[in-house]
């Protein structure tokens, strides 16, 4: 298995961890997010969410909980995950977070 495949598999696992973390820490079951990740895989699910203009239901809920730090958008701005995404996708993630008043820490700049 290539390093890229390993990274994609690890990212998928991280997306499931985000779901579990939101459920445990925010009492939020992001059912649609979990289904999307399960059906498409973590990377394709994240790319699909980034392709929409409006913030997802999950992102809005995490904003309400003041936990945007565990959002998919904040996660992909961190190493090593940012290596899986285009510059455009990373900019979209930053923009969505910024619109909600959250300045993400990015280890990929």
Image (cartoon, grey):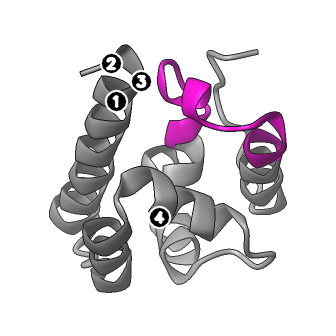
Contact check, label 2 and label 3, Cβ < 8 Å: yes
Label 1's element?
helix
**Residue at left 66%, top 24%?**
106
Based on the picture, tell me whether residue 81 belongs to the magenta stretch: yes
Q: Name the residue under label 2.
A: 2
> Around disc 4, counting alpha carbons within 10 Å, would you say few (fewer than 14), some (14 to 19), or many (20 or more)?
many
Contact check, label 1 and label 4, Cβ < 8 Å: no
**Residue at left 25%, top 69%?**
38
In the picture, the disc for residue 4 is 3
Please state the horizontal and vertical placement of residue 12, each as a whole percent of the image: 30, 47
Q: Quadrant of residue 3?
A: top left
Q: How far apart are marks 2 and 3 (CA)?
A: 5 Å
> Around disc 2, counting alpha carbons within 10 Å, would you say few (fewer than 14), some (14 to 19), or many (20 or more)?
few
Image: magenta residue range: 75-91
Q: Quadrant of the C terminus?
A: top right
Label 3's element?
helix
Horizontally, residue 27 falls left or right of residue 73, namely left
Please state the horizontal and vertical placement of residue 94, each as a whole percent of the image: 77, 45
**Residue at left 69%, top 74%?**
55
In the picture, the disc for residue 45 is 4
């Amino acid at each position: 298995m290539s390093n890229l495949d390993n990274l994609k598999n690890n990212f998928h696992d991280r997306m499931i961890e985000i779901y579990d973390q939101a459920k445990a820490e925010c009492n939020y079951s992001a059912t649609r997010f979990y289904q999307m990740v399960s059906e498409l895989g973590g990377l394709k699910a994240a790319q699909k969410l980034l392709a929409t203009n409006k913030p997802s239901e999950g992102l809005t809920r995490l904003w309400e909980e003041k936990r945007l730090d565990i959002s998919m958008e904040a996660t992909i701005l961190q190493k090593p995950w940012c290596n899986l995404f285009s510059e455009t996708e990373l900019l979209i993630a930053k923009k969505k977070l910024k619109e909600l008043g959250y300045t993400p820490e990015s280890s990929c700049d």
